[in-house]
Amino acid sequence: MARPGETDDRESRPARDTTTTITRTGTPGIGGITATGPGHPLPTPLLATNRVGQHVRVPKTAELVAAHLRRQIVRGELQEGDALPPEAVLMEQFGVSRPTLREAFRVLESEALISVRRGAHGGARVHTPNGDVAARYTALVLEHRHTTLADIHTAHTHLEPTAIRLLATTATDHTLTTLTAHLTATDHALTTPTPDPTDIHTRHLRFHTLLLDTTTNHTLTMITSMLRHILDATTPDTPTPIPDLPTLRHQHTTHHQLLTHLTQHDPDAAETLWRHHLTTTPHTPHQPTTPLDLLGE
């Protein structure tokens, strides 16, 4: 206790910093997470959200290995079909045991980022992120929620015309040339003595895919492609038959009309035409209460 008029040294000294420094105690070689001991704090924003006594989950070593490889795949450092180094090389690189490495592989396999073949001539090969994988999981969520085909189709017929509207304002000469070449090839297929309805129908589906692939908004393209994938993958009791040739010719005419609107950069006409086209195709569910069923009995 200081006497009157005096200053207590304890009060004048700065308070001791009692903040807990969270350090990364990882495995050498894993994506730069190699620090051990004090002096390597996590980024400030993360520290600021933690409180004294709050439980902090430390990632397992296998998760760190998986995160490092996942980062390389997503960032394009590893390409589709690339073979990962042998297990012995990766074990040395990451400084981990074989069970830990294989656990990391199982994590990446569950995300469809690699496929692993066992045996003397096996190994792990890279798969880049694929929208079909996301679509399959989305379909499971929708089926679990008892979603109907009409519900999915309604969402699709609202979103795809929006993508077409955007395409009408951003279509480049290269995009228009690609679409024109595809329709020209379909023209030739329709003028053969005996056009194959299945072939023409496949070409029409390809035209839909080309439209979405050339849209400049990747998010909108991903969502609409996922919905189309789900609709195409449904297994109703009576599959939608291939349209007859008069119907296919009418659809082809609509595709040419859309190309004209895209060439003229007319978003209103393009969106209106495509919305009507989608709502009048055989993909439209005739029973609004038909549930999504990808799993079957």
Image: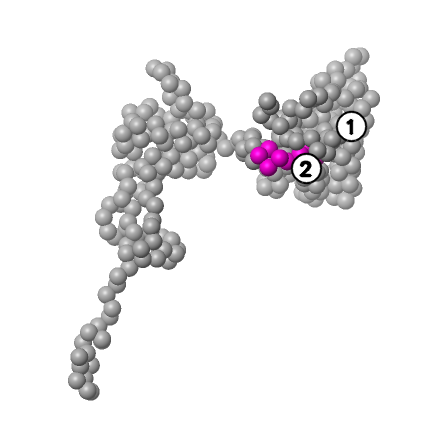
Instruction: Judge depth for marks 2 and 1 and give the one in front.
Output: 2
- Which image quadrant: the N terminus? bottom left
Q: Residue at x 59, y 41 (%)?
A: 219
Number of numbered markers: 2
- Asked whether the viewer can see residue 181, the reply is no
Q: Say if 7 sits above or below 195 in the image.
A: below
**What residue did someone put label 1 on?**
251
Task: Give yes or no for contact between labels 2 and 1 (Cβ–Cβ under 8 Å).
Answer: no
Q: Residues within 10 Å of mark 2 (few under 14, many from 20)?
A: some
> Considering the numbered disc 1 on the image, is that residue within a helix, a strand or a loop?
helix
- Residue 195 lies, in percent from the top left, at 77, 15
Q: Quadrant of residue 250?
A: top right
- Residue 52 lies, in percent from the top left, at 31, 57
- Residue 95 lies, in percent from the top left, at 26, 33
Q: Residue furthest top?
A: 193
Q: Quadrant of residue 259?
A: top right
Q: Residue at x 64, y 36 (%)?
A: 147
Q: How is the image coloured?
A: one colour
Label 2 to label 1: alpha-carbon separation: 24 Å
Which mark, residue 151? 2
- Asked whether the viewer can see residue 294, the reply is yes
Which mark, residue 44? none
Q: Residue at x 24, y 51 (%)?
A: 38
Give, as a single range, the part of the protein colored magenta.
Answer: 143-150
- Which image quadrant: the C terminus? top right
Q: Residues within 10 Å of mark 1 (few under 14, many from 20)?
A: some
Task: Identify residue type, mark 1.
Answer: Gln
Q: Residue at x 32, y 44 (%)?
A: 58
Q: Residue furthest front?
A: 297
Task: Answer left or right for 140 relative to 119.
Answer: right
Task: Identify residue type, mark 2.
Answer: Asp
